[in-house]
Structure formats: structure tokens, C-alpha cells
């Protein structure tokens, strides 16, 4: 296990209910219980994966941890503080330490901003570089994510999906965070590019001591890179355990169903880098 047993983030009794309108003219109202009494810890340095069927609440959970959506009730403890109670400026300051990488990098990159300025912005905003040092920092971050210095002048439309996701990851690590939510961060990429991005995330975790909440639906990847896995169904965590135990001795019937639907994993390596996909088919 890569992580410690020190809780970096603690989620307690988290609930998120959405009011939704139905009917032809929106005349009827109902509620969706996206998160129901969710409690768990994320240990410093670990990769905790969240798996579950579509609509089980994975993204709502990830967004709630960063206060990108406000929970209906419950608490999220980080650095001794319940960040659910944060005001706007406290949230902005907190997000230097807690970052998120989404599935579609193009939707989060400004199409009119170069890669260099996308990475420079958080550096300058959080006082992590000055006008004099920012270019060197941008180049160092580009190198960290496997991109050469010339990428600083490119615009998002000039990037492949994998390159754009590298930029999004670079922008996240520019803030020197300790915790990153990866919300289906490899799902939209070609299979061979997925392996490259997984390997990059593994390298960055080792280099910077990062903690990941890795939201995914692909159990073969989750099985490879996670320290622990939480299984969500209907807004609840139905099972959470260390990876080895969860995959070899699942306790919940739904976990068994998910695992049964996953291709057999043949690799016995303990190295979390992927050689290529489909490595396990
Ligand atoms: N803004 C919203 N308004 C209304 N309902 C929402 C909203 N956001 C999420 N939901 C509902 O909450 C539930 C959980 O959604 P969520 O996106 O967290 O699931 P998920 O497990 O991430 O799904 P997927 O794997 O498809 O991304 C779903 O029923 C969804 O329709």
C-alpha cells in the first residue's frame, strides 16, 4: 500500500439531494438522492478509487469534496476544518491544495488561452511564481507532464486528447496540491493513451507525494492502480476495502456483480505502470 493511515480528507454523513422538475411543463417536482449518508477517509498518499454504475453518485461525491457542488448535509474535514462551511474566498484558497481533473480536458481549457498561460495563471494567482520566474516554472511543469517547452505557445485546438489531458494535469499540479480528484480522467482517451496518462499519474504521485481520489468505471484499471476501492450504488458506499481484499473476497453482492463483468486480470506485477492496454484482456 502506497498510502499511510493518516486521514488527509474525512467525509462524514455526506448527503446531496437534487430537486428536479418533471412533466411536460416542469409542473411536477421530485428529488434525486445523489449521495446518501456517505462516510469514509482518504489516507495521505493513497489512491482511493470510486467505482459504481452510471448515476451512482461518483461525480457528485468528487465535486462535493472540492465544494464545486454544495452538499445538502454532512461534513468534509480537511486540515482540521469542515470545508463545507467555507465561504467563497476560503474555497478558492483551499482549491490550491485540492484539485480536480475532469474527463474532457477541452471543456476546462479556455480555447483562447495558450497552454503556457493556462499553466501560468494558477502559478501567479497563488503566488507560486513571479513574472520573472513564471516561464521557467511553466517549462518545468510541462516537462513534468511529458510535454516539451514549445507546447507553451499552442492553443487547445492544436492538441490531441492525450496532450490536452497532460495540460489539464499540469495545470492541476501547478498549484502544488496534495489531493487530486481524477473524475474519469482517462475515460475519453484512446486505449493506448490511457496507459500513458495512468503512468504519468503514477509518476507524479511518487514524485510529489500526491493523494488521488480516482473515479472510474473501468475496473481493470482500478484493479491495477488503486490502494483501496470504494463501491457506490444508489448514492451510498456499499463496500470499501483494500484493493486485494475487495477483488479476491468481495463482501457485497453488487461488488461481486461488478467484478464478474470485468475481464480477467492476468498480470501479477506489483508495478503500477501499465505497459499498454489492453494489458489484461
Ligand atoms: N445538477 C443535477 N441536477 C439534478 N440531478 C443531478 C444533478 N447532478 C447529478 N444528478 C443526479 O444525481 C445522480 C448521481 O449523479 P452522478 O453524476 O454523481 O453519478 P455518476 O456515478 O458520476 O454517473 P456517471 O458515471 O454516469 O458519470 C444521478 O441520478 C444524476 O442524474
Image (cartoon, helix red, strand yellow):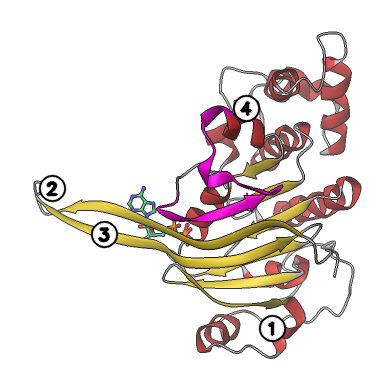
Q: Is residue 109 magenta?
A: no
Q: Element at badge 4?
A: helix
Along the line of sight, the residue nearer the viewer: 100 or 259: 100
Query: Of tags 1 and 4, which is closer to the observer?
Result: 1
Q: Give the residue number, with chain letter if any, for mark 3.
A: 31
Give how far apart the Cα atoms at labels 3 and 2 are.
Answer: 13 Å
Q: Is residue 73 magenta?
A: yes
Going by the picture, which residue comes out furthest to the top? 132
What kind of element bears circle 1?
Answer: helix
Q: Earlier in the sequence, mark 3 or mark 2?
A: 2
Asked which quadrant contains residue 272, the reply is bottom right
Q: Is residue 185 visible?
A: no
Given contact means CB atoms under 8 Å apart, are the residues at marks 1 and 2 in contact?
Answer: no
| Magenta stretch, residue numbers | 70-89
Which of the marked residues, 1 or 2, is nearer the chain's N terminus?
2
Q: Residues within 10 Å of mark 2 (few under 14, many from 20)?
A: few
Q: Quadrant of ligand 1?
A: bottom left
Q: Is residue 235 left or right of residue 108?
A: left
Q: Secondary structure at mark 2?
A: loop
Horizontal side of 30 relative to 281 (left or right) equals: left
Residue 159 image position (x, y, % from top left): 67, 31
State the residue position of label 2: 26
Amino acid at each position: 500500500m502506497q498510502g499511510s493511515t493518516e486521514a488527509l480528507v474525512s467525509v462524514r454523513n455526506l448527503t446531496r439531494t437534487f430537486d428536479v422538475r418533471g412533466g411536460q411543463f416542469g409542473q411536477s417536482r421530485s428529488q434525486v438522492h445523489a449521495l446518501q449518508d456517505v462516510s469514509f477517509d482518504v489516507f495521505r498518499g493513497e489512491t482511493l478509487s470510486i467505482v459504481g454504475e452510471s448515476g451512482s453518485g461518483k461525480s457528485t461525491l468528487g465535486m462535493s469534496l472540492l465544494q464545486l457542488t454544495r452538499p445538502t448535509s454532512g461534513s468534509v474535514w480537511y486540515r482540521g476544518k469542515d470545508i463545507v462551511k467555507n465561504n467563497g474566498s476560503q474555497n478558492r484558497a483551499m482549491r490550491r491544495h485540492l484539485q480536480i481533473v475532469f474527463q474532457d480536458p477541452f471543456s476546462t481549457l479556455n480555447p483562447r488561452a495558450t497552454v503556457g498561460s493556462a499553466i501560468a495563471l494558477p502559478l501567479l494567482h497563488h503566488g507560486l511564481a513571479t513574472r520573472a520566474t513564471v516561464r521557467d516554472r511553466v517549462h518545468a511543469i510541462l516537462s513534468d507532464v511529458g510535454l516539451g517547452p514549445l507546447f507553451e505557445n499552442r492553443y487547445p485546438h492544436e492538441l490531441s486528447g492525450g496532450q490536452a489531458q497532460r495540460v489539464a494535469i499540469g495545470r492541476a499540479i501547478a498549484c502544488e496540491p496534495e489531493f487530486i480528484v481524477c473524475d474519469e480522467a482517462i475515460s475519453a482517451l484512446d486505449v493506448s493513451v490511457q496507459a500513458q496518462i495512468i503512468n504519468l499519474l503514477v509518476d507524479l504521485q511518487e514524485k510529489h507525494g500526491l493523494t488521488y481520489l480516482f473515479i472510474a468505471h473501468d475496473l481493470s484499471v482500478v484493479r491495477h492502480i488503486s490502494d483501496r476501492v470504494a463501491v457506490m450504488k444508489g448514492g451510498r458506499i456499499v463496500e470499501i476495502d483494500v484493493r486485494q481484499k475487495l477483488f479476491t473476497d468481495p463482501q457485497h453482492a453488487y461488488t461481486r456483480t461488478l467484478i464478474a463483468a470485468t475481464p480477467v486480470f492476468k498480470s501479477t506485477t506489483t508495478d503500477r505502470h501499465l505497459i499498454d492496454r489492453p494489458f489484461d484482456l
